Image (cartoon, rainbow, N blue to C red):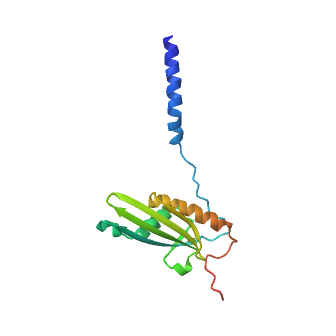
């Protein structure tokens, strides 16, 4: 009878820990790759940072640029908004130890594609990467230079 209880306890413990092990399992990389026929899309980053401490005034565009370099190497970051295929606007707010990030993604024509709030800048960058590359891969293969109308 004792061995039966130990066996039951072992099974119960295994079943109880199963959701924990599944939750910590590696998640697949959901970032799409750039279609072979496409040049890399160009993304212009702009940010505003506000808060009640002196450190809140940092320019978060540099932080976003670093995160894009790590997370999404298929995207080119540009400092020239006229050459951008997409624009990302970040509103970073720090109050005490609390931080809030609002991010907006717009297509070259200015149409809003996505807006999100909360989470870290790195998490927002990963989401933006997925949105941009998914949209870009649907476009006909063309140069990344904006149309000049000439």
For residue 85, above or below residue 127: below
Relative vertical location of residue 12 with respect to residue 136 in this rendering, above or below: above
Q: Farthest residue in the bottom direction?
A: 150
Task: Determine the image quadrant of residue 105.
Answer: bottom right
Q: Position of residue 65 (x, y in %)?
A: 46, 68
Q: How many marks?
A: 0
Q: Residue, x 68% and y 66% (percent of image)?
A: 138
Question: Is the residue 149 above or below the residue 137 in the image?
Answer: below
**Viewport quadrant of the C terminus:** bottom right
Looking at this rendering, what residue extends furthest in the right direction?
A: 140
Q: Residue at x 60, y 77 (%)?
A: 109
**Relative side of 78 to 111, left or right:** left
The quarter holding residue 140 reads bottom right
Q: Position of residue 38 (x, y in %)?
A: 65, 69
* Residue found at x 50% / y 64%: 68
> Left or right: where does residue 139 sit relative to residue 21?
right
The residue lying furthest to the top in this view is: 1
- Left or right: where does residue 17 sit relative to residue 145? left
Provide residue 2's location: percent of width, then percent of height: 48, 12
List x then y, in percent, for residue 101: 44, 62
């Amino acid at each position: 009878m004792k061995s039966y209880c130990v066996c039951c306890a072992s099974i119960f413990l295994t079943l109880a820990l199963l959701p924990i092990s599944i939750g910590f399992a590696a998640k697949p990389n959901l970032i799409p790759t750039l279609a072979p026929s496409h040049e890399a899309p160009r993304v212009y980053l702009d940010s505003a940072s506000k808060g009640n401490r002196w450190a809140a005034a940092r320019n978060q565009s540099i932080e976003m640029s670093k995160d894009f370099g790590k997370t999404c190497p298929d995207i080119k970051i540009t400092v020239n908004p006229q050459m951008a295929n997409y624009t990302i606007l970040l509103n970073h707010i720090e109050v005490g130890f609390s931080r809030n990030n609002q991010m907006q993604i717009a297509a070259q024509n200015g149409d809003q594609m996505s807006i999100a709030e909360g989470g870290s800048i790195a998490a927002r960058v990963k989401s933006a990467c997925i949105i941009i590359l998914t949209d870009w891969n649907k476009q006909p293969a063309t140069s990344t230079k904006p149309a000049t109308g000439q």
